[in-house]
Amino acid sequence: MQLRRSETFVASRVNTRRELRRSDLLITQLLTLMKTKNPLLFIASIIILMSIKSFSVARNSETIYTVSKDGKSDFKTIQEAVNAAGEKLDSKTKIIIRKGTYREKITIPATKGIILFEGESATETIIVNDDFASKKNTEGKEMGTTGSSTIFIFSDNFSAKNITFQNDAGRVGQAVAVLITGDKAIFENCRFLGFQDTLYLKGEQDVPTPKREIRHFFKNCYIEGTTDFIFGAATAVFTDCTIYAKESATYLTAASTQGNSKYGFVFIDCKIEGDAKPKSVYLGRPWRPFAKTVFINTDISNVIKPEGWHNWNKPDAEKTTFYAEYSSKGIGADKEKRVSWSHQLSKKEAKEYSIKNILSGKDNWNFKIE
């Protein structure tokens, strides 16, 4: 039986009251125990009491909204659900998105708390728009690459699973599907569809003096495009992902890593496939001088050029970028033909590229959807 929104709210209130009654009873019993003269029992009572209070807060801190095209959920559009999400840093909002194609241009403001998008199906829950860089906005000015994105994620601690993010403008130049400036975004079992500039991991690229390193984690995702379709300044790990070079593709990545960042884009146990012509696509080129991109245990198909990397016609960048591989396999993995200024990591060096080393940071981020 499916409850209406109001019925769900009432049921939630009833369950919450029951939880509170149980907690109040336990607290009363513990307060009685705390009067004992046994010091060990007194300390144990305090610890249990603190745990109960913490558990109660955790259980009651998540808000859940549903979105569906048929109007039978809390909202008909994803943006409406985002607008309703909490703005406290410790607030948690799960937005369950039913199957359907949602043609929207979505903005998640930096003021939002923790938000999770959860789709019913990665292939049938689709967020899509068709803006592109040279398209005119309402003021008659070109949108630019940044303005073309289908979704803007400015908040920290955003996560998504089982969703397709798409820009279907076609072969019209830069047309972003996802743009992220917030920290600690996680994507699991998601698809990113587009052509040029599909996934923009912008980070603090345009900040004159960057104050923090922006980190992201992609697990079991599919990312497609033609030119520079994974690009930006953030630090990002891609594990068990498929990188698909579409027909007429040229470059997979275009990192603009900050000069003080140890890591840039790191691909672990991924596959590079596509229907581009054999030996026609580069692994990457440097959008900024300190670009860093590393492929570890990657299965590389024949679409990749033997030389692997391009300097974007900037010879000086060969001295400042860091492009490397470790244990690549497949037809396109011939390390003997890679450009001389790229690197092949040793086993010892490759161990430094654990997900924890790359992403945990000073705050010990656990890079998991909770």
Image: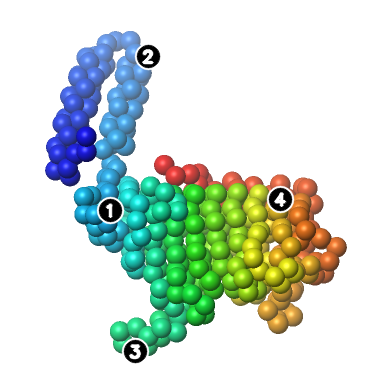
Instruction: Indicate which label's residue lies in the foreground, 1 or 4.
Output: 1
Mark 2 and mark 3 lie on one chain; the one further toward the N terminus is 2
Residue underneath mark 3: 140
Q: Residues within 10 Å of mark 3 (few under 14, many from 20)?
A: few
Q: Is residue 20 above or below residue 268?
A: above
Residue at 83%, 66% in the rendered image: 337
Q: Alpha-carbon neighbours of circle 1 within 10 Å: few (<14), some, or many (≥20)?
A: many
Q: Are marks 1 and 3 in contact (CB under 8 Å)?
A: no
Most foreground residue, 162 or 356: 162
- Label 1 or label 2, whichever comes before in sequence order: 2
Q: Secondary structure at mark 2?
A: helix
Labels 1, 2: front one: 1
Residue 50 at what x, y percent from top left?
31, 28
| Amino acid type, residue under disc 3 in the picture | Gly
Say what secondary structure mark 4 lies in: loop
Task: Give how far apart the Cα atoms at labels 1 and 3 are.
Answer: 33 Å
Residue for badge 1: 68
Q: Which residue is mark 4?
A: 297
Please name the residue shown 60% across and 68% down the image: 246
Image quadrant in which the N terminus is located: top left
Q: Mark 2 or mark 3: which is in front?
A: 3
| Depicted 25 relative to depicted 69: above or below | above
For label 2, the residue is 40
Q: Residue 128: tell me if it is visible.
A: yes
